């Protein structure tokens, strides 16, 4: 399949048409926001065009086929037989995070997170008047690890743990041992786990482990998922939760009712069903494309820009780059990428203080874009050396 860069300029997309707003200039290559520049699967395009032919786009119910497509996907992708009643449709993972915070905590309660992290993890806690407990991740020898001693100390004070698995921005797929250790600690201290697993279909090093499949986890866990990152349909605002515990499920539903969000996105539901039923071959080839892109960037950095280290990449179309070898502080580094390299990446510091010295690079694009980006970066680094 062809995973060439699709020209998205003029479509009002955040990634390309939001450059001026995000970076202050529009003559840079955008390799930041977490969607891809490749076309969605043909099965998705065909299903949406077919639905488009019906001239009414009114309120949409979540059909039995919607739920069954998720059940079938979990069986195929994760070898886990979930029940239809465990599934709750939602309008986005960030919506789910906010609803869960309201459902399981009260103002002033503490919520455990691990930075650097996708920014809405922090803002959702703060905007809901809860307290952030930050278990900062550790970065050494090109690998991201967890400070478990600190994790347990903070879990003693927390009501809720917002987990990102696989992790964004570091692209770590947590091992069974790491997940089990977090589950054991949370179970012991009565902490509910809300696990954002939106990138779980894009794991390369091993099969993704849905955290609720582990011992002790099922009764304390909510899994948040979507087809959006996997099949490049994020703009359709359709996601779902998998909550095996009926008590947690009912508490979430009670909080969800207050959002007033009851109907599905007409095209989002169609796209999810089509992606899960007809996108398997496309996804396998996409993963091969992303891995090839990762290897290209890795080799380029190693041979041409050794000042920048690509960290262990287990999952996602995002690379976590250790740029501390450039000898720049965060403000100067951000300016360097924008003004000298003419590249739009996410600065590590935007994910929290623990991300200082890093940058996040989106490789979910065509090889032509990456070659252009690496060439620009090499020229800019040569000026620093000089």
Image (spheres, rainbow, N blue to C red):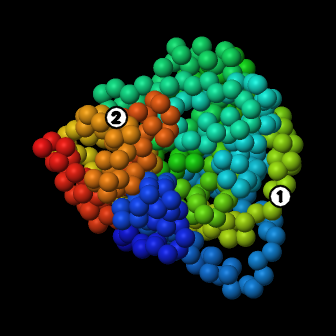
Q: Is residue 232 left or right of residue 143?
A: right
Q: Is residue 154 visible?
A: yes
Give the number of the mark in front: 2 or 1.
2
Question: Label 2 crowding class (10 Å Cα cut-off): few <14, some 14-19, many 20+?
Answer: few
Q: Is residue 283 visible?
A: no
Q: Position of residue 283 (x, y in %)?
A: 47, 60
Q: Which residue is mark 1?
A: 262
Q: Position of residue 162 (x, y in %)?
A: 63, 33
Q: Nearer the viewer, residue 133 or 384?
A: 384
Q: Which residue is mark 2?
A: 329
Quadrant of image for the N terminus? bottom left
Q: Is residue 28 left or right of residue 101?
A: left
Q: Up-down: is 90 above or below 242?
A: below
Q: Position of residue 375 (x, y in %)?
A: 22, 58
| Residue extending farthest left | 386
Q: Nearer the viewer, residue 353 or 335?
A: 335
């Amino acid at each position: 399949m062809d995973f060439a860069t699709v020209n998205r300029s003029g479509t009002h997309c955040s990634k390309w048409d939001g450059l001026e707003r995000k970076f202050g200039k529009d003559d840079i290559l955008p390799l930041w926001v977490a969607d891809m520049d490749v076309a969605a699967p043909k099965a998705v395009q065909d299903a949406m065009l077919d639905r488009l032919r019906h001239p009414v786009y009114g309120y949409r119910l979540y059909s039995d086929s919607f739920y069954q497509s998720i059940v079938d996907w979990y069986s195929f992708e994760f070898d886990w037989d979930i029940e239809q009643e465990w599934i709750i449709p939602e309008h986005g993972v960030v919506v789910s995070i906010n609803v869960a915070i309201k459902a399981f905590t009260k103002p002033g309660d503490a919520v455990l997170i691990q930075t650097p992290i996708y920014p809405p993890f922090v803002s959702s806690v703060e905007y809901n008047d809860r307290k952030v407990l930050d278990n900062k991740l550790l970065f050494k020898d090109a690998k991201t690890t967890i400070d478990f001693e600190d994790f347990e100390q903070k879990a003693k004070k927390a009501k809720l743990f917002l987990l990102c698995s696989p992790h964004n921005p570091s692209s770590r797929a947590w091992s069974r041992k790491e997940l089990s250790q977090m589950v054991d600690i949370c179970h012991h201290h009565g902490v509910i786990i809300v696990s954002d697993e939106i990138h779980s279909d894009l794991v390369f090093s091993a099969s993704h482990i849905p955290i609720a499949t582990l011992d002790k986890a099922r009764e304390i866990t909510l899994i948040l998922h979507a087809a959006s990152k996997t099949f490049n349909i994020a703009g359709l605002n359709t996601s779902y939760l998998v909550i095996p515990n009926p008590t947690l499920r009912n508490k979430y539903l009670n909080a969800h009712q207050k959002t007033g969000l009851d109907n599905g996105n007409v095209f989002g539901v169609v796209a999810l069903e089509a992606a899960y039923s007809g996108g398997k071959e496309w996804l396998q080839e996409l993963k091969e494309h992303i891995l090839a892109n990762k290897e290209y960037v890795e080799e380029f950095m190693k041979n041409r820009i050794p000042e920048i280290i690509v960290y262990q990449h287990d999952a996602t179309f995002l690379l976590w780059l250790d740029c501390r070898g450039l000898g720049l502080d965060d403000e100067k580094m951000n300016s360097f990428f924008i003004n000298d390299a003419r590249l739009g990446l996410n600065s590590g510091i935007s994910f929290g203080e623990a991300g200082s010295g890093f940058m996040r690079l989106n490789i979910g694009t065509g090889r032509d874009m990456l070659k252009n980006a690496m060439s620009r970066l090499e020229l800019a680094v040569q000026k620093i050396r000089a």
